[in-house]
Image: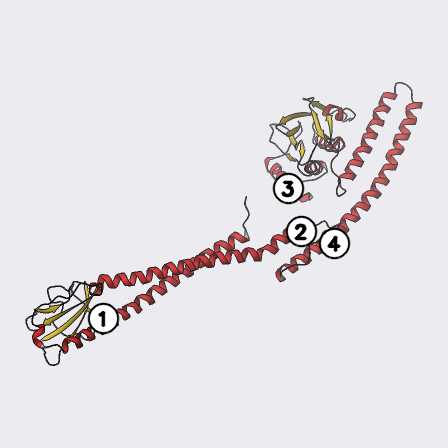
Amino acid sequence: MMLPSIRRRLAFSLLWVSLITGLMTIGLVRYIVSHEMEELMNQELREAAEIIHNVLALSPVNTAATVTRTGNSEYEEHLVWQLINSSSGAVLARSNKAPLTALLTEVTADPLPTPDGRWRVISLGFKHDPHRILVVAQSETERGEAQNDAVFYTFIGSLLMILLSMVLMNWRMRQELRPLNTLSRDVQAYDPLVPATAPPSAQREELKPIETAIQDLGQRLAQRVISERAFTSHAAHALRTPVAGLDVQLAMALREAPESLRPRLQRAREATTRLGRVMQALLAMFRSGIEPQRQNVVLADLLAPLSFNTLVIEVDSPVQLNVDPDLLTAVLLNLLDNAQRHQATRVNMMVTQLGSQTHLRVVDDGEGCSVERRSKLKAALERQDYSSSEGLKGLGLILADLVLRAHGGSIELPVVSQGFCVELIWPEKNIASGSVT
């Protein structure tokens, strides 16, 4: 499952904040531009009406007695005028694009829309000729297009600025997160036992507490590893002496014992030798930097020196296993001991190869366990929670999990109709170390 990413979350937050802020800004700008454009066009209409009024006021009266047309121009497509007889409503004169009928027959103080909604008009009277009215009009369509153009270009400009801001902020965010990525790589390469690999000084104030915590943790881990190595060395020396003494005593007993006892003594000596190797393998496994010593072995050969009284062990496959024989022997010893303690009389071991994975299934006919307890054991093994409160009492499953993880594998607890089943799975290639054996 993909974990949440700080960078992605910040990028999405930045995107939404930018979009919401941009839309609010665009809405505000649209309102302001529309309002200001409305006032500007009304002022333009008023000023144009005053100019035309002044020109016509200076003209002789008889010059406006007939309808005239001016030349066609772009200006007149946006702004038209009419000279109206207020008594009869007749159009005395008009511009090229002006309607043939009067748009307004009374004087207005402010620009008003016509009843049909097509024009915005303003009218002015003449002091010396009260029967004449000048009507100046502007198309509502043109006014709307002008406002829409202003809003559209403002929107495009704002959108481009938002996109540019997002790109710059995203680039800046990556720059600011780079020290965090660098710290992550430095921590990954950090070996507490090698002080030279400690992460360099933090490049940001916020990362300083993390760096200090990592260094403190590294120092504690290094001290613990040193102490465990010292203990392991003492334990190896302390255990090696009695095992070696047992081997010497059994060797002497072999020479002095009658012929009938020598096979049993020989098996006891072989088991003692195997015990010594298992002990060394277990001690070595808990030392830092020690990898499993893989060999090609046959499962039946590993089980031959072992003795479990009345427990019957069946091996269904002669397939060779690529594994550390001493560690696997330690695992099987504990699993078989667990089976015997849970009233098992027979254990069946099956080896299968699925691709590059080796599966070793150990099934006993003992009392087994409930589904709830099996689920609890599986969850504890997945978390590597080896506390007794999780039901992992004893060394069997804990040792199996540690050894299989050291081989780059895992253990499963399949459901069986009777007894208890443990499946050991590991690859031919050691994933944990990356080596091919």
Judged from this view, the residue extending furthest toward the front is: 71
Q: Position of residue 109 (x, y in %)?
A: 19, 75
Picture quarter containing residue 437? top right
Q: Give whichever of 275, 387 is nearer the camera.
A: 275
Residue on which the image places disc 4: 219
Q: Earlier in the sequence, mark 4 or mark 1?
A: 1
Q: Find numbered disc 3 in the image and state the secondary structure of the residue it sits on.
A: helix
Q: Find numbered disc 1 in the image and state the secondary structure of the residue it sits on.
A: helix
Q: Earlier in the sequence, mark 4 or mark 2?
A: 2
Residue 360 lies, with reference to residue 287, above or below; the image says above
Residue on which the image places disc 3: 380
Distance from Cα at disc 4 to Cα at disc 3: 28 Å
* Foreground label between 2 and 3: 2
Query: Which amino acid, mark 1?
Result: Leu
Residues at discs 4 and 3 in contact (Cβ within 8 Å): no
Query: Which amino acid, mark 4?
Result: Gln
